[in-house]
Amino acid sequence: MRFRKVLSGALAAAMMTTMMCGTAFAAEPANGSYTGEIHFLNANGSGNTSMCDPIFVHEAEIELTADTAELTFYVAYPIPAFADQGADGTIKDVVFTVDGTEYTAESDITTKPEKEFDTDAALFGISAGDSLPTQVLTVELPRDVLDDLEAGTVSASAYVNVFMNMTQNFFVSVTDLQAEGGAQEPGEDAQNTQDMQITADVEEVISEPEYTVTVPSSVEMGTLSAERNNVSTYPVDVKAENLDGTLTISAPESGSLSNGGSTLAFANSFGSQKVTEDTAGTKLSGQLTVTAEDVAAAAAGNYTGTTTFTISYAAD
């Protein structure tokens, strides 16, 4: 029995969208209020945006003082395609890490300001140009974090409370810092500025994971013994390319064989096993066990049964 899966369509596009870049911080900004372009990047360091990036508003607010940079950003709440999930927030337990120190974000799910989204994400029911209510997240970071935000090297984690229902890790990028209202610090000389718009194309190359899992179509346990436990070992073969995530193969811990109206229990030791790296051929294994005690109590006959393996893939 062979299982073959290649990710495609909306989910693959969401996971593999090319990183969006903005203008770098030209000079150390003065204290005051700013906006910037924010993106959430994959934690694997590829520089690609996370599949979760489209659920965030890509304009953030930064309030700078002599010592701190208070970052405020927004995430759709609720997610249109999963409106019945995440009643207590689209994301929870949001933590930024800077130089080994953790900074926990405060969440506001009450005010729900409407913000415009600029990215199509069919998986989440979001289209570019949509104006949606949002959850507000605010975190106070040290002032010198600006360079790391510009480089996209500030790490963050959040429990995604819809669809995934698990903690996701990101790198956070904030670029194109702009002063709100053109304000300047007291005592500064007035300056004239002109903007130059720069456009460039980066070809998107999507490397899709491809994997094959081969489970034996049948296992023959032969004539069962009533004097000792009956154990049969079987292999499961895995091949994977461009994995960039985790492939999980799992099977139920128990099942039953049947012969007309009679049944005979069996145990399956395979459990849940994972493959995280490309492989030309990895052999996993499990054992089927029928106890001698159960065989002794069973009616004579030919017993057959089925166990179902589940194969799933999750991108990093």
Image (spheres, rainbow, N blue to C red):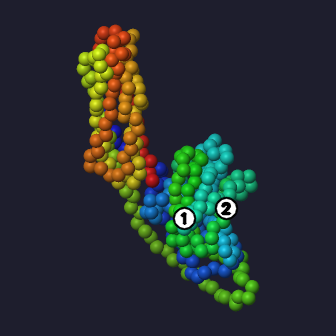
189 in relation to 299, above or below:
below
Residue marked by disc 1: 100
Left or right placement of residue 186 versus residue 84 in this view: right
Residue at screen point 59% across, 74% down:
144
Tell me whether the residue at label 1 lies in contact with that at label 2, contact meaning CB atoms closer than 8 angstroms: no
Left or right placement of residue 25 versus residue 44 in this view: right
Image quarter where the N terminus lies is top left
Q: Amino acid at mark 2?
A: Thr
Q: How much space separates mark 1 and mark 2, taking CA atoms?
A: 19 Å
Measured as percent of width and height from the top left, residue 238 is found at: 31, 43
Residue marked by disc 2: 138
Judged by depth in the image, the label closer to the viewer, 1 or 2, is 1
184 in relation to 119, above or below:
below
Measured as percent of width and height from the top left, residue 276 is found at: 38, 50
Local packing at callout 1 (Cα closer than 10 Å; few below 14, some 14-19, many 20+) is: few
Measured as percent of width and height from the top left, residue 212 is found at: 32, 43
Q: Is residue 123 visible?
A: yes
Residue at screen point 44% across, 70% down:
201
Whichever of labels 1 and 2 marks the residue nearer the N terminus, that label is 1
Pick the front one: 273 or 35:
273
